[in-house]
Each structure stands twice: as structure tokens, then as C-alpha cells.
Amino acid sequence: MSRAFVNEDNAAAQADQPVERQISAQPNYVTPAGLAQLQARVVELQQLHSQQSAQGERADKQRIADIERDLRYFNQRVQSAQIVMPSDCDQVRIGHWVTFADEHGHEQRVQLVGEDQADAASGLINWGSPLGRALLGAKVGDEVTWKRPVGDVAIEVLAIELG
């Protein structure tokens, strides 16, 4: 018998196992809204798991495995969450809204949030991203360098607001 056929059953079984979601090495700082989103996601996944499991033999085994993987991930994110309460201060912190302008005068407004809450299209920027790291700790009037793969950009902090 050829070796090519020996592990065929094992390969098929492993194909059904979803790849684990990677946990970031950076601290899991979250805003209160970010923690609420994580907790809501856990509840949603628990409900989906119950619904799928209740189907017994008709349940989609791959769907259950995906839900269980996501539950492990989000439970771990809730457990490791470190809530950052935005405070009224003169330096950019997690949870603050920041208005800045680039060297061409183009203004942008973003909020620094935890990585699970980040949504660039909504202006929610991961504090650990290049833009987040450039803004973190800056004060109104400071010029900081946003290090981007396509080239560095000098930006000026125009306003800092509580989230």
C-alpha cells in the first residue's frame, strides 16, 4: 500500500478543524464600549452554539467547530481586557477622539480604541497601529510622524476630545 493513502482519513479530519484565531501580543486595552461589544459577541456566539447543538444529527459540524473556535477567542479577549477610561487630559489617550491635519491641510478625526473595536471606515483606530502609536501621548499643537509603509507623513494634532 502506498504511503499516500495511509493518512487520508487523518487529513480529512484535520480539514474540518478551523484554524485558531491568533491572539495579539499587545496588551488588550479596551474602551468601555469595546468591552461591551466583546461581551455581546460572546453572548451571540453562545446562542448560535446552542441553536446548532440543538439540531443534533442535522447540525452543521463545521459551523459548530467555527463557533467554538470564535467562542474561545472572544472569551479569552474578554478575560484579558484591560478597561481604559478616557479621562479629561491634554494628551491623547485610548478612548479619545483626535482631530489632526496632514501637511496638505487635510483634516481627519479618529478615536483610539482597542484592536477588537477598531473599524477604520468608522474612524475607530487601533491604538497599536502606526497611526495610533503616532498620536498616543501627543498634545494639541504637537507635530508627530505617522510612519506608513508608503512613506512617513507629518501630522499636527488639532483637537483632543473625550470619547
Image (tube, grey):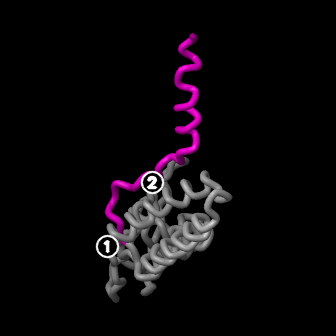
Which dot, 2 or 1, sits closer to the camera?
Answer: 1
The residue sitting at 59% across, 69% down in the picture is 48
- Residue type at the position of mark 1: Gln
Q: Residue at the right extreme?
A: 58
Q: Residue at the top extreme?
A: 1
Q: Where is residue 120 in the image (x, y as percent from the top left)?
A: 57, 66
Q: Can see residue 133?
A: yes
Q: Position of residue 5 (x, y in %)?
A: 58, 19
Q: Name the residue carrying label 2.
A: 147
Quick one: 129 or 55, which is closer to the camera? 55
Magenta segment includes 159? no
Quick one: 87 or 23, which is closer to the camera? 23
Q: In which quarter of the image is the C terminus?
A: bottom left
Query: What label sits on residue 82 in the rendered view?
Result: 1
Question: Taking 13 as reference, is 56 above or below it?
Answer: below
- Residue type at the position of mark 2: Lys
Q: Mark 2 Cα within 10 Å, few/some/many (few <14, many 20+)? A: some
Q: How many marks?
A: 2
Q: Can see residue 99?
A: no
The residue sitting at 40% across, 55% down in the picture is 23
Question: Taking 88 as reference, is 147 above or below it?
Answer: above
Q: Give the range drawn in magenta.
A: 1-29
Question: Taking 3 as reference, is 24 above or below it?
Answer: below
Magenta segment includes 13? yes
Q: Where is residue 79 in the image (x, y as percent from the top left)?
A: 33, 69
The residue sitting at 57% across, 11% down in the picture is 2
Quick one: 139 or 11, which is closer to the camera? 11
Q: Position of residue 9 (x, y in %)?
A: 56, 31
- Whole-angstrom CA distance, mark 2 to mark 1, is 26 Å
Q: In which quarter of the image is the N terminus?
A: top right
Q: What element carries label 2?
A: loop
User: Quarter of the image holding residue 30?
Assistant: bottom left
